[in-house]
Image (cartoon, grey):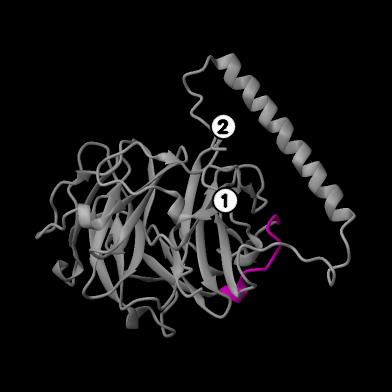
Amino acid sequence: MERPDLRNLPEEVQAYIAYLEEALLRLQNKLAAVALATAPEPETAKPELSEPPTTIQVISISANGLAKRTPRHLYGRQRRGGMGVFDIDLPDGDAPAHLAIADVAAHLLLITNQGRAFRLPVTAIRETAVRDRGSDILSPLFMRPNERLAAVLPADSGSQLALASRKGWVRLIPQVRLGSSLIPGLSFFDTAHWGQIAAACWVENDADLFIATRQGQAIRFAARLIHKNGNLGIRLDGEDEVVAVTAVSEQSQVFLLTNDGKGALRPMDSFRSNKTLGAGGKAVFKTEGLVTAVAVQPQDDLFLISQSSKIIRFSAADVPPKSGPVQGVNCMALRNDTVRAAAVAYLREM
């Protein structure tokens, strides 16, 4: 059963419901611990998996650079709107900031807010159980003052990397410049003039880019229109800022996610591509807190992680597609919590 919107109830009723939910969660965790302690030996225990065992890893990274990886098949699929399970165990003052999904044999491409790029083998991140502590991955990179990760994605996954700044500027970087010969920390973006990096994605030469802002505005245009030195991709109003960029086609759907756990699917055949760059955005979501936007297909799975390290996996097909601006549907049940990041598990090969 999907958790309803409780915001219109009296505060004391909301508090009582939150108390009951917390008590239920504690009881579930206690029962799970008892079940684990009395479980049969591994060779006879047959856990129910949402997919066959795979080498694909779910990588959780905190704002302070603590990271862990866990095989994707260990995350059970839930229904949209569920509570999720606890994932990376972080110290006080830190919180999840990024989710990435990559094969254990691959590399990750780390992009900082100052426009610098690093490659990191997935195997350099410690493999753990679903609920476990992360280890530091940033200290060996010698980060600058006030530098942090802005985007984490599988390396070598497209012909060009699109970098988008908070101020709406965008630039394409050929994959060959980001390959195995990449000089660690090489800068690819003039953040002093164009603003700090907000997001990145891989894009093919014949694809479009979809850029979304925190206030639910978006623009779509052909990637080939971008000058080699970069362009203004979207014109922003007031205090708005870019939060996401993703590659799309006419057949794509974009999953839009807000910090209060609401989500929506927007088919691209209902969102016209602009013929030029730098125009104002069009409303795609009624929100002041858009977190991300990622291209998906109905057969894919979505992973969401919250401020308190709760993670949920559900099918993109659970989210109804809408052709206009919406308020979204509940994708994750939150209590005094916010959604921080999302990632797509591409299951089209299964």
Relative side of 239 to 279, left or right:
right
> Magenta residues?
122-132
Point out residue 292 in the picture as x, y percentages from the top left corner: 39, 50
Q: Disc 1 residue type?
A: Ile
Whether residue 328 is situated above or below residue 234 in the rendered picture: above
Q: Residue 183 versus residue 337: which sits nearer the camera?
A: 337
Using the image, tell me which numbered label, if any, was put on residue 10: none
Point out residue 69 in the picture as x, y percentages from the top left corner: 62, 65
Whichever of callouts 2 and 1 sits on the residue coming sooner in the sequence is 1
Would you call the spot at circle 1 few (<14 residues within 10 Å), some (14-19), or many (20 or more)? many
Q: Nearer the viewer, mark 2 or mark 1?
A: 1
Q: Residue 331 versus residue 242: which sits nearer the camera?
A: 331
Q: Residue 162 versus residue 197: which sits nearer the camera?
A: 162
Image quarter where the N terminus lies is top right
Point out residue 68 in the picture as x, y percentages from the top left corner: 63, 62
Q: Is residue 64 visible in the rendered structure shown here?
A: yes
Magenta stretch contains residue 127: yes
Q: Main secondary structure of the magenta part?
A: loop
Would you call the spot at circle 2 few (<14 residues within 10 Å), some (14-19), or many (20 or more)? few
Using the image, tell me which numbered label, if any, was put on residue 312: 1
Whether residue 152 is situated above or below residue 331 in the rendered picture: below
Using the image, tell me which numbered label, if any, was put on residue 336: 2
Tell me which corner region of the image, top left, top right, bottom left or bottom right, holds residue 258: top left
The secondary element bearing badge 2 is classed as: loop
